[in-house]
Image (cartoon, rainbow, N blue to C red):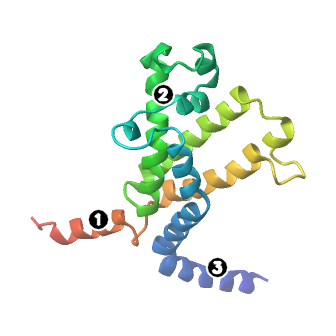
């Protein structure tokens, strides 16, 4: 049994050395792109107006989604909502949905973008549970026998993919990797 385990460890260690630094981060970015890129971009588009300059201004939908109780308290009149902290939170949340997913897919500032996206998902989940009145079945529970809880189960997988990117970075097949390679090749020896 010890020989079999040692053989397995040598084989997979070699595979990980050969493919792990580039393939695992690329695969994580592709999974993110496949499952979440359009989800977040479409969600972001529901928060802004169309055309110039409204595409740069969070609309009432952004307030209703991000700070629903504050928006309701103001009668959905965003001019009655203080910029600090609520307007700032809405602005940051809206543009995080545009920028962070694109950075992750491109593999640019991958670690920071992935860490920011984890924070975004945590805040999104807290808002969904506390302000949008999700029922217990929708929220789910970790370690239960039902794998379809939107918050506890589904978003745990989302965060796992992002943790891989926080720990591994964008990999060699990313803009981060290309920029690092360019930087190394242009470095002057002293």
- Depth check, front residue: 73 or 185: 73
Q: Is residue 75 left or right of residue 144?
A: left
Can you say which quadrant of the picture contains the N terminus?
Answer: bottom right
Q: In the rendered structure, are the residues bearing label 1 and label 2 in contact, judged by CB atoms less than 8 Å apart?
A: no
| Circle 3/circle 2 CB separation < 8 Å | no
Q: CA distance from mark 1 to mark 3?
A: 30 Å
Q: Quadrant of residue 132?
A: top right
In the displayed orientation, state which residue is furthest to the left: 190
Position of residue 154 measured from the top left corner of the image (x, y, whole percent)? 72, 52
Q: CA distance from mark 3 to mark 2?
A: 48 Å
> Along the line of sight, which residue is nearer the eye, 8 or 135?
135
Secondary element type, mark 2: helix
Residue at left offset 88%, top offset 48%: 144
Q: Estimate the x, y position of residue 129 in percent, counting from the top left.
A: 73, 32
| Residue 126 image offset from top left, x and y in percent | 66, 32
Q: Is residue 68 above or below residue 174?
A: above
**Residue 150 sits above or below residue 184 on the image:** above
Quarter holding the C terminus is: bottom left
Q: Is 30 located above or below residue 149 in the figure?
A: below
Q: CA distance from mark 1 to mark 2?
A: 33 Å
> What residue would you read off at disc 2?
89
Residue 16, relative to residue 92: is it above or below? below
- Residue that mark 1 sits on: 180
The residue that disc 3 covers is: 9
The disc, 1 or 3, on the residue closer to the chain's N-terminal end is: 3
Neighbor class of circle 3 (other Cα within 10 Å; few <14, some 14-19, many 20+) is few
């Amino acid at each position: 049994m010890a020989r079999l385990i040692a053989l397995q460890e040598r084989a997979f260690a070699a595979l990980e050395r050969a493919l792990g630094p580039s393939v695992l981060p690329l695969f994580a970015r592709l999974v993110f792109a496949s499952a979440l890129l359009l989800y977040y971009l479409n969600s972001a588009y529901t928060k802004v107006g169309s055309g110039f300059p409204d595409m740069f201004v969070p609309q009432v939908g952004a307030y209703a989604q991000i700070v629903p109780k504050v928006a309701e308290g103001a009668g959905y009149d965003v001019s009655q909502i203080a910029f600090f902290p609520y307007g700032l939170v809405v602005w940051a949340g809206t543009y995080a949905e545009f920028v962070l997913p694109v950075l992750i897919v491109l593999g640019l500032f991958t670690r920071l973008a992935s860490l920011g996206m984890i924070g975004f998902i945590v805040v999104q989940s807290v808002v969904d549970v506390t302000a949008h009145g999700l029922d217990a079945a929708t929220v789910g529970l970790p370690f239960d026998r039902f794998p379809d809880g939107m918050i506890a189960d589904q978003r745990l997988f989302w965060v796992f993919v992002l943790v891989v990117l926080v720990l591994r970075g964008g990999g060699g097949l990313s803009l981060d990797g290309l920029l690092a390679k360019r930087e190394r090749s242009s470095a002057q020896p002293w």
